[in-house]
Image (cartoon, coloured by chain):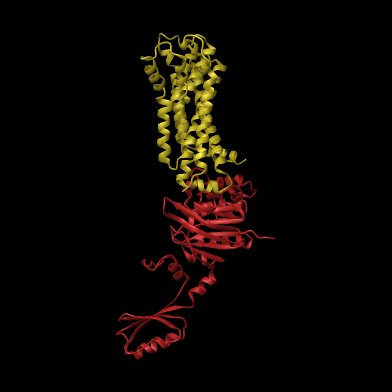
Chain colours: A yellow, B red
């Protein structure tokens, strides 16, 4: 299969990138250290779950950077340098190239981020002396899924742009909009609709809007996982102050994450399929 | 049995914007088993044509087939049967030369031996183990050529293959092209330097500003140049009282005071011209003759008369 050959080559190529491993180290360090933060705050009874929760707050912001850096040049970079001419001159079609790139770069990101989260988990285990294996495993999976969804977005951008500069501009815009500043959207909506900033309880639609970005969906899923392990940690019910309607259930956010993985990829393909490469 | 042309284009056109024609109404047939030279100055549209053959660029109108497969609808079948050394490509800097060849072998699902391919293009084991980012232009070109040879393609497309190569490398490319055709394959050899293709090509097409201005065999082109030569006599004074029109084999005589220039289609007529000039009272200071070359013809096709002619310094 051509796509698997490309995926293997992408993996081989990208694992040699020092920048990527630098970023993975940063993810491991930041997640590992933030998981210890609850110990420093006296009014928290520093549990390992709270520690993991704190670590994922940072993962929601850092993982997108790793994915975007790992993948935004996957196709645009090859177009600008011209290596895409060698690649497409061999057998693969453009769709195969996109699929192979997505799988290969996702593999690198999952391996890198997985390593980072495992290191952070090990650190948390050493300090707290315990680690809920199932919940931690779920967090590893979710963090990897967040990474893959931003790889999908980055490959989509890369397929739709002809130059590095444009891919980078779009990548930064997407990062700001979807990872860093998204929380302002539900807050702004809350202010407009209800005339005040959100307080201790929020309407259910607030939970939905908050979770419509990949990072927001990730946070919502992590919260659901932590709260399922320990009801003392507030989940969606506590935030809404009652029963959670269907559109703010955890599976909605799983769908959101899946949609962010596939839709940009398909859109990128539709642009790339008919474009002139010169 | 009906033979399918190796490459055929019909009215192939690529327009950018409203009125910039990179390639205009190009109709061309390359038969199987021939080495076809695709000539033209830089910017004539050679690479755009090749890009359209390979489905890297979509034509504005017209169509192209390779081995009977449509360039747009059956690109995958074409890529399976074509080896291309593109212009303006780059390699994967972090991967070794050998990995590149192995990558091409996997993608083409061929059973080639990477070492054998590397040896054919003249890359030794030490070079093949290094990352391609450390390669010189010539080594990169050899590696890219090796990738093109993977899978024993029926058609080999070489776009400016000699750029960056030393004379040895250029000779190797020619030898490879020739042996590929001798084995029944087809070679489409693009170049802006006629002398690099004339030794190896069965036929050439000359492209100028997106249009095909000539297609012929090298011999055919030579014939259309004629056996003409230019003779230039440096004289002290312009010859007077003599006519040149009646000399057989001498045409286009031009006088400018210090030289007499003429085109000479019969070598023996040169002496008659010299005698006639001396009869006109001129002392001949120097005689220079130059055989017309294919290069002149190429220049004539590709540089319209209203532009200053630039003599190719390369050779």
Q: Position of residue B288 (x, y in %)?
A: 39, 79
Pick out the residue farthest to the right. Answer: B1
- Above or below residue B164? Residue A133 is above
Pick out the residue farthest to the bottom. Answer: B279
- A69 or B264: nearer the viewer: B264
Q: Residue at x 35, y 91 (%)?
A: B279
- B146 or B187: nearer the viewer: B187
Q: Residue at x 59, y 56 (%)?
A: B155
Does residue B254 appear in this view? yes
- Above or below residue A129? Residue B288 is below
Q: Position of residue B19 (x, y in %)?
A: 41, 54
Does residue B315 appear in this view? no
- Which quadrant holds the N terminus of chain A? top right
- B250 or B142: nearer the viewer: B250
- Above or below residue A263? Residue B119 is below
Q: Position of residue A195 (x, y in %)?
A: 36, 15
Q: Residue at x 39, y 89 (%)?
A: B275
- Above or below residue A88? Residue A28 is above
Q: Position of residue B220 (x, y in %)?
A: 54, 72
Tally of numbered tags: 0
């Amino acid at each position: 299969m051509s796509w698997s050959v490309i995926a293997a080559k992408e993996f081989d190529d990208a694992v040699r990138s020092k920048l990527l491993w630098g970023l993975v180290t940063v993810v491991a360090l930041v997640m590992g250290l933030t998981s210890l933060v609850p110990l420093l705050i006296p009014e928290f009874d520093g549990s390992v779950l709270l520690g993991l929760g704190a670590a994922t707050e940072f993962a929601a912001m850092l993982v997108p950077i790793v994915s975007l850096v790992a993948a935004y040049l996957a196709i645009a970079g090859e177009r600008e340098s011209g290596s895409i001419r060698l690649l497409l001159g061999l057998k693969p079609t453009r769709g195969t190239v996109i699929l192979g790139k997505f799988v290969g770069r996702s593999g690198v990101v999952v391996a890198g981020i997985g390593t980072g989260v495992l290191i952070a988990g090990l650190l948390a285990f050493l300090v707290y002396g315990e680690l809920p294996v199932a919940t931690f495993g779920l967090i590893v999976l979710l963090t990897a899924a967040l990474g893959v969804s931003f790889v999908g977005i980055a490959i989509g951008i890369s397929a739709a742009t002809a130059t590095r500069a444009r891919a980078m501009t779009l990548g930064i815009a997407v990062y700001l909009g979807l990872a860093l500043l998204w929380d302002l959207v539900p807050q702004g909506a809350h202010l407009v609709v209800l005339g005040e900033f959100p307080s201790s309880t929020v309407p259910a639609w607030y939970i939905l809007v908050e979770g419509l970005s990949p990072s927001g969906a990730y946070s919502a899923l992590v919260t659901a996982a932590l709260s399922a392990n320990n009801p003392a940690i507030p989940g969606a019910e506590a935030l809404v102050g009652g029963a959670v309607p269907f559109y703010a259930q955890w599976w909605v956010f799983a769908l959101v994450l899946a949609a962010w993985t596939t839709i940009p990829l398909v859109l990128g393909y539709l642009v790339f399929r008919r474009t002139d490469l010169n | 049995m009906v033979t399918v042309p190796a490459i055929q284009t019909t009215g192939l056109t690529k327009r950018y914007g409203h009125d910039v024609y990179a390639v205009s109404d190009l109709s061309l047939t390359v038969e199987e088993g021939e080495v076809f030279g695709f000539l033209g100055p830089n910017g004539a549209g050679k690479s755009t044509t090749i890009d359209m053959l390979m489905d890297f660029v979509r034509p504005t109108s017209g169509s192209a087939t390779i081995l009977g497969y449509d360039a747009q609808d059956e690109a995958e079948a074409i890529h399976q049967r074509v080896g291309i050394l593109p212009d303006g490509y780059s390699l994967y800097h972090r991967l070794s030369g050998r990995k590149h060849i192995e990558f091409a072998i996997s993608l083409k699902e061929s059973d080639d031996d990477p070492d054998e391919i590397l040896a054919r293009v003249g890359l030794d084991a030490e070079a093949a183990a290094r990352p391609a980012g450390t390669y010189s232009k010539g080594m990169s070109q050899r590696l890219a050529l090796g990738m093109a040879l993977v899978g024993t393609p029926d058609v080999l497309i070489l776009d400016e293959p000699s750029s960056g190569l030393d004379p040895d490398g250029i000779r190797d490319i020619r030898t490879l092209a020739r042996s590929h055709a001798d084995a029944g394959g087809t070679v489409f050899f693009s170049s802006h330097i006629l002398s690099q293709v004339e030794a190896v090509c069965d036929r050439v097409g000359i492209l100028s500003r997106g249009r095909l201005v000539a297609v012929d065999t090298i011999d055919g082109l030579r014939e259309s140049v004629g056996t003409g030569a230019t003779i230039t006599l440096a004289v002290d004074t312009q010859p007077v009282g003599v006519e040149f029109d009646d000399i057989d084999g001498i045409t286009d005589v031009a006088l400018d005071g210090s030289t007499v220039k003429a085109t000479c289609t019969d070598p023996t007529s040169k002496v008659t011209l010299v005698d006639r000039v001396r009869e006109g009272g001129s002392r001949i200071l120097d005689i220079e003759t130059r055989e017309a070359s294919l290069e002149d013809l190429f220049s004539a096709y590709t540089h319209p008369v209203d532009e200053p002619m630039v003599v190719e310094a390369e050779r």
